[in-house]
Image: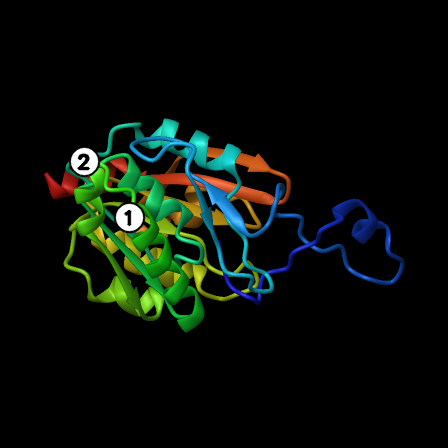
Amino acid sequence: MKKPSKSHSKNPKSAAKAPGKPARIPVHKGPSGEIRLIGGHWKRIKLKVADRPGLRPTPDRVRETLFNWLGQDMHGMRCVDAFAGTGALGFEAASRGAAEVLLVEHDGALVVQLQRVQAQLLALELPEAAALQKLQIVRGEGVATLRQLAPASYHVIFLDPPFDSELYEPALAAAARALAVTGSIYLEGPKAWTDAMLEPWGLVVYRHLKAGAVHAHVLRAAPSAVASAA
């Protein structure tokens, strides 16, 4: 999903063999320029995405697994994607009936494209389009927005910062505060996170998968944190 600072190789094998150069991170397979919603009201609908260097949609296979973990039916859930990029995760949540979806993106061109996608879905005039009325797209910085959310107010928080950024720890700290007691954080990055690494924020790994160089996690509050909140 994200920003121009992320590496993107169209030919990961040749990139890995290039002498004298570090291997680039192979993070996306499939045609660029579009995403396909894989579940819910708008299943199989293809959406155009902006042609931006390094923009990295979460692959279909990872999204499918993620929503198997989170649950196919997201009715009643409040979701926020703090680094929206293509909006693949947020639109997928809306497609599955989320009560509220907040997409946060700092790149103005990507914000415009997200608004176009929302308009495209609304133009389908399906009965379920009411879900998109509760989808809000804002231009802003992900961590700052998370810090402004009320404590324990969101059921699902999607975190997919640029791979080479230093945003992971501040994003996790802010997301942990905004997470509902029984909620989930989706964390996508270039390395696997362990319970020991997540301990400062009272989080543990609930699910993890590796797809190429991408590590996808679902995090939840540690049992001790849940007990103290009860």
| x 44%, y 64%: residue | 167
Say what amino acid the circle numbered 1 marks. Answer: Ala
Say what amino acid the circle numbered 2 marks. Answer: Pro
Query: Residue 31, how many percent across, how many down?
Result: 61, 44
Disc on res. 127: 2
Taking depth in this image into account, of 72 and 163 the one nearest to the observer is 72
| x 18%, y 34%: residue | 75
Query: Residue 199, how many percent across, how many down?
Result: 36, 48
**Residue 108 visible in image:** yes
Within-10-Å neighbours for mark 2: few <14, some 14–19, many 20+: few
| x 26%, y 48%: residue | 122
The kind of secondary structure element at disc 1 is loop
Give the residue pinned by disc 1.
123
- Occupied quadrant, residue 144: bottom left
Query: Residue 213, how many percent across, how many down?
Result: 63, 44
User: Could you tell me how many numbered marks the image carries?
Assistant: 2
The kind of secondary structure element at disc 2 is helix
Taking depth in this image into account, of 180 and 222 the one nearest to the observer is 180
